Every structure is written in C-alpha cells, then in structure tokens.
Amino acid sequence: MTLKTFFEKFDQFADAPNAVAKMRELILNFAVTGLLSEKIDGDAPVRELVDLLAAAKARRTKNVRRNAPATVLSEATIDRPIITPKHWAWVPLNDIGAMSGGMTPSKAKSAFWDGDVNWFSSKDIKSDELTDSELKITRAATEKTGLQLYSPGCLIMVARSGILKRTFPVSILRVAATVNQDLKVLSPFVGGLERYLQIMLRGMTDFILSSLVKTGMTVQSLKYEEFAEQPFPLPPLAEQKRIVAKVDELMALCDRLEAQQKEREEKHGALARASLARFAAAPTPANLNFLFHKSYTIQPADLRKSILTLAVQGKLVPQDSKDGNARNVIDRAMAKRQKTINTKSLRRKELDESAVLFKRVDLPTSWCIERLANIVDPENTISYGVLVPGNDVNDGIPFVRAQDLCLSNHPEKPNKTIAPDIEKPYARTRLTGGEILLCVVGSIGKIGIVPDSWAGANIARAVARIRPIPDLLRDYLLLVLQEQSVQNYFTSTTRTLAQPTLNIGMLEQTPIPIPPFAEQRRIVAKVDQLMALVDELETQLATSRANAKKLLEALVAELTAA
C-alpha cells in the first residue's frame, strides 16, 4: 500500500482519536527513515555535504586545521535509533550546526523592554516558522547583556518545559531575534538545511524525549551535552530537498483533511443544537436515538446532563391531574414532621424562609419546591460522620469514605474498618442501607447509594448522609441531587479551607423541586429508560471509534511493512 492509498482511505478511520495527527506523525517517520525518497544516481554523495559542513564549522570556529576531515560515524560505531538508507550519513548535531541559548534581561530595567528586537520564549514556539515574538527587547538589552542576535535560518527548540513530556517543539527562525534561557538554537553551518533539519528533529521526537530529556525533574529539560553530541541522519543535499518537497505536499494534504473535519464538525454542531431542541420538546427514545446518531459533537455525558435537567423541570413526562398537587402532600408531611419534632423534643435548625421558593413559574403547577432539610427524616437529619477514624483494625466497623461512593457495582464491604470505640460516639450516622450519601469535602457533590450489605457501617467526615421522608421517592431525590443546577449550587456555596468544603447548613438549604409522588415514579422510570439507551448508544460509539482506531493501526502497519 502507498501513502496515496492510505490518504484515500481517510474517511474509513477519520473517527479514530487524533487521526490527522497520526498521519502527520507517520509522514515525519517516513521522511526521517528515507521512505519518502529514493537514491538517484546523479545526486552528489552525502560525503560532499559532510565535508562542506566541516569546512564551514572550521571557518566559524577559526579552526586552523581547515582541511581537517569531517566526522562521519559508521554503523559499527553508533547505536542508530532508527533505520536509514545505507547511502545516508550519521553526523553529530554539533558538526551540523552550532548550539547555543539565551537569557532573560532584567525585568526591573524598563530600558531593556518594549523595543523592536524579537525575543522568543517557549510559549512562542507553536508554528513551523517564527516571524514575530510576543515580547520584545531593546537594542540596549542586547548590548548590555551580551544576548546573541540570531540570523534567519536558525532552528529554535524548546529545551526546558513541561511540554517535553509529550512533544519536542522545533521552529525555523525567519527574522533576526534573541531567545530566553528555556530555548536552544541550532545555527546550521551551511545555509538552506533548516527545513530538512526541522523535519528530522520532529521525526525523531520519540527518541529525543525518551533518551535525551532529563527525567525525574520538576520541569523537563534536554540533556544539552548529550543532545549536541548525538548523531543524526543526513541524506545527500539533493535528496533532502526532495524529502522537504514531499513532506510539504503531504502536510498540505493533512491541512485540507483537517479543514474538512472542522467543516463537518461545524455542520454536526448545528445539527446537534437542532436535535437537542427537538429532544427537549419531545424527550422520547426515538428522538434521543436521532440526536445521538446525527451528531458527533454531543458527548454521552452531556446527554445525561440534559436528561436530568429535563427530568427536574417537569419536561420529561406529562403531568396527570389525577396525581394531585405536591404542595398539599408536602405540607401534610411537614406538619407530621413538626409533630414528631415536638413530641420527641428533637432539634430543628432554622432555615431560610421557603415562601420565596414557591414563586418559580417554570415548573408545572402541580409541583412545589422545598428546602432539603425539610424533606429528610427528622430523626435522622443530614449529618456527616467520624472526624478522626484512626488506623484500620481487624474485625472493626466498616467505614465509608468519599472514594467509596458509587451508584452501582458496590463491593461487599468498604475497604476500611475502624475501631468500635472510635465509631461508638457517632451512632447517629450509622447506616442501615438505602441512604443517599453525598461528598461534602474534596470531591464536592459526588453521590452514592448505600447497599444493604453495608448496613452497620459508618461514614467519614467528608460524607453526608441523606435519608428522605416517605413522601419523597429516594430515587427521584437522587436524580435531583445529580442535576447540574443543583451541583452548581453545591459548588457555589463551597468554601475553600484545607480542602473544598460544603457546609452542612448550606446543604440543608438546597431547594428541591418536587412533583406529585406518582409523577416521581414516572420520572425515575423514564430516566432509567433513557439512560440505558444512552449507555447502549455510547457502547456503539465506542465500538465504532475502536474499530476506526484498529483500522488506522492496521493500515499504518501495512504501510510501514511495505
């Protein structure tokens, strides 16, 4: 298979992650291993280029032995990181060009800044060629600090940055400029080599990152001396020019494919918005299916958020006048709750006046809104658990932490156990099974359900227990607490102490939209149905993308084996 055939098959693997980026990487790999070019009998041998480099280096460094032989390393003397054609040469980088760097003039001296001299830093190294820097210095800065002014045609490389964990940025300087201390500059001894050298360095990125970058550092940096002495592959000069022309041709094709992808994504985005509006107006499985398959820009996570929002706005299922009015039911529950509080002399926190909550006109008239604290069991108010759990103990009390919270696939027991004497003072938060748990320290808003097998366990300080009254369906409340506007409320009321912390008092104030009980059941059933469909469609999408990735990998393997 040829590269042309590979590009023609693009539509078959376009959905693979980073498909165009993979194509660019493949082009560079082919370029640096000689697979984009071939030897032509009329080409001058690479030895002539190497001798030319050696003579130019001698002149630049004022070496009296101007006729000294150039350094050409044989295959037997080096461990080549890639396979290249036999007629190419491997030459140390410091025999190809002079390596140097820069610095940052004192920011305290205003006379050094806002001049007309380009001064590049790592954040500027984003394109093939550099023509203008974000910051500029003055002529006085270069004169007083000794900063070197580099000529056009040099290669500018990021030598110190966290970006060296994943890529090795290299740009060609097209204007006279200086650089800061995080960059290294390669000034080729012979002009006109810069584009091939850029392709070569980019094509060997994996090797450079794995072998020539310091690891275990706070910020990654090049092993400067090793990098300068590292041999790199040089083809004959005429072949370099053919490689550059072919790479530029193929990269231009990648640019067109990328533009086509962007255009397609924009069209899909417009369709997605229309489809989402259609689903919001009629949230049926058919419309959800239509939405999912007609748009590649809406992610399953966003669909799930939309379903929950529609659910708590009363737009997911139709209202039924036979269901009655939720306000009447909640008022009776509140009266019963108050009677329990008075009879048992229970403590009741003062809440913000709820009358203002009744003014929401965006909900169905049969719905009401109530503070979360008023719709939990008065004998089991919202509470967090053990402050200092201590170490694990054998046969201790199971202990639920924030990392244990989940909605399904629970382990038989939480991993941690605590001593019974530590747990005993916190009997009020001992679990019986079925409660809602909510993270109030760290991962604010994370939700979990207590399985029956966890009965008898207790909870951590970072976890709040919520047990709703019988008139509120637990699974409906679970949907509300996961809905985005409620999650946003949690975030907005969070304080940042040692860790983000949601105060229980603010949690109790959470406004909860409540439909009639029968409608709560219908909403939960509808959400379950639609979420199951999203799960199924997500699996199909993941399978499609995985198949596209496998196809891309197979085509790459076939191409590189040819």
Image (spheres, rainbow, N blue to C red):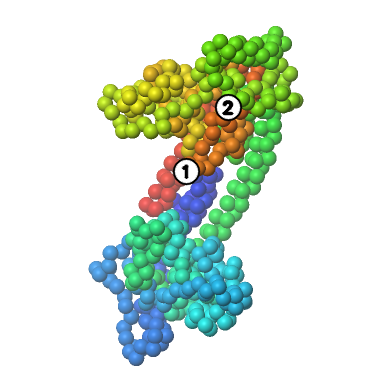
Q: Please provide percent x and percent y for residue 452.
A: 41, 17
Residue at the spot 60% in from the left edge and 31% down from the top edge: 486
Image x and y of residue 349, in percent = 58, 24
In the image shown, does 114 or 178 lie closer to the viewer? 114
| 53 lies left or right of 177 | left
Q: Is residue 319 left or right of residue 557?
A: right
- Which residue is depicted at the point 45% across and 79% down? 190
Residue at the far left: name it: 76
SS at mark 1 in the image? loop
Amino acid type, mark 1: Ala
Q: Which residue is mark 1?
A: 498
Task: Name above or below for residue 255 compared with residue 522.
Answer: below
| Closer-to-camera residue (532/508) | 508
What residue is rendered at 52% in x and 24% in y? 382
- Residue at x-position 40% and y-position 63%: 221
Label 1 CA crowd tier, 10 Å (few <14, some 14–19, many 20+):
few
Residue 158, labelled with which disc? none
Which residue position is annotated with label 2? Answer: 508
Q: Secondary structure at mark 2?
A: helix
Residue 309 appears in view = yes
Mark before the other along the chain sequence, 1 or 2: 1
Tag 2: residue type?
Glu
Task: Inspect this view and state whether residue 207 appears.
Answer: no
